[in-house]
Amino acid sequence: MQRDRLRISIRAYLATISLFLFESAAGAQQLTPAETRGTHIYLRGESLSGTPVTALMGDDDAELNGHSLPCANCHGKDGLGRAEGGLTPSNITWTNLAKPYGHAHSYGRTHPPFTDETLARAITQGLDPARNKLDKGMPRYRMSARDLADLIAYIKRIEGDHDSGLSDSIIRVGVLIPADQKGERIRRVITAYFRARNNEGGYFGRTVEPVFLDGEKSGSGLRTSIEEKNVFAIFGFASPRAQADLADIAKALRIPVIEPSPEFPDPERAVNPFTFYLLSGISEQSLLLADYTARVLAKRGFVLAIVHGPGAASSMLTQRILKRIRSKNLGTLEPIEYVGTRGHAEETVNALRQRRVRAVIFFRYGR
């Protein structure tokens, strides 16, 4: 029975995922062949044609393989640049490069807007449109004329190209699952579901390739795992610790995340354009329940108590509920911590009686 309920809940979740993938595949703008080739050079420092790409560094023109210094290493997948090691790489999105009024940098250098020709010169000679030398941290690349044109074509498109894991034929999605028997059952259901959808034609001619990730990972380990898999979107069943980091990772990598509901008690951390929840989590549910209970009981002068488990998560959620209720003057509210032992349970009940509590909101977040 429990296994059947798990399958039903997963299939309901997958039905929503299917709608998301259907809409995304329909609206996705594909790269041109030149832009696709340019993507490979930008991200990997290699040409799909097999012609060499090399990078010259420093005053002595030390020559390195382009694979060791791809553009994305410093300028990022989105072209916005990431400060690192004392260097601040430029924003190379075309909107920024081609500003009609040109550029005036904080360190005094000025130059006109970039054109295709001057951008090619910056890439190969390390000179800006006014022929000023670029920072020594910027390599000068050697590549064929076609590869250079392809790279520039992609740079002009980069700010609108955030669809990792999406090709003309495949949608690669990351699926977070627990590393236990439940996770294995989830894996089988999801694999079977997408196999059936792919046999029916997939989504606008694209098949779905699920990539399963460890739902227990968090922090930098989780981010590295997601980046290595190059996925279009992420969904699944992350642990509370992983889920708390997932919202930040989704925003940083610009990858949509779809979760059944937020597990962590501070949903404000997850408010960003890349995180979506099908259901409200324990925090929002508790706030709504407290609102309703206090509003009804306040008319009768009842005392309302919040009985919660130990730990920072429970304390944080309790404070949020207290703040909400007190801001609306909805009656007396008593917070009581409940440890969970038999003796403490009796002590808690006696405390509720002594305070003449008439209604209790009880939750024990976490373990």
Image (cartoon, rainbow, N blue to C red):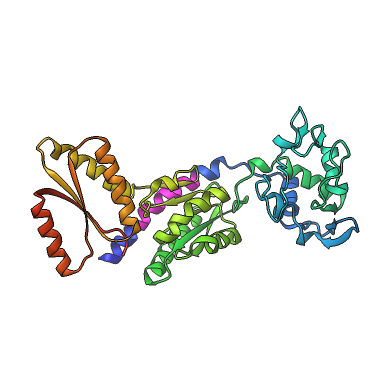
- Tell which of 169 and 94 is nearer to you: 94
Task: Reply above or below: 256 against 326.
Answer: below
Q: How many marks?
A: 0
Residue 337 counted in the magenta span: no
Q: Nearer the viewer, residue 331 or 364?
A: 331
| Residue 107 drawn above or below residue 236 | above
Image quadrant where one finds the N terminus: bottom left
In the picture as drawn, the residue positioned furthest to the top comes out as 101
29 displayed left or right of 210: right
Q: Is residue 10 magenta?
A: yes
- Residue 121 place in picture, x, y as percent: 87, 43
Q: Is residue 8 left or right of residue 251?
A: left
Does 261 sit left or right of 351 as displayed?
right
Q: Residue 222 in the image: x percent, y percent?
A: 52, 61
Tell which of 360 and 154 is nearer to you: 360
**Residue 202: image location, x then y, percent:** 51, 52
Report the predominant secondary structure element of the magenta stretch: helix
Kindly indicate the quadrant of the structure image that contains residue 115.
Answer: top right
Q: What residue occupies the far right of the structure in this picture?
A: 60
Q: Is residue 354 visible?
A: yes
Q: Provide the residue span drawn in magenta.
A: 9-22
Side of 164 where 274 appears, left or right:
left
| Residue at 65 percent of width and 46 percent of height | 78
Residue 205 in sight: no
Q: Nearer the viewer, residue 146 or 303?
A: 303
Q: Is residue 276 above or below residue 229?
A: above
Residue shown at the point (50%, 56%) measured from the top left? 198
Residue 150 at x, y percent in the picture: 78, 46
Q: Quadrant of residue 188?
A: bottom left
Name the quarter where the C terminus is drawn: bottom left
Q: Quadrant of residue 331?
A: top left
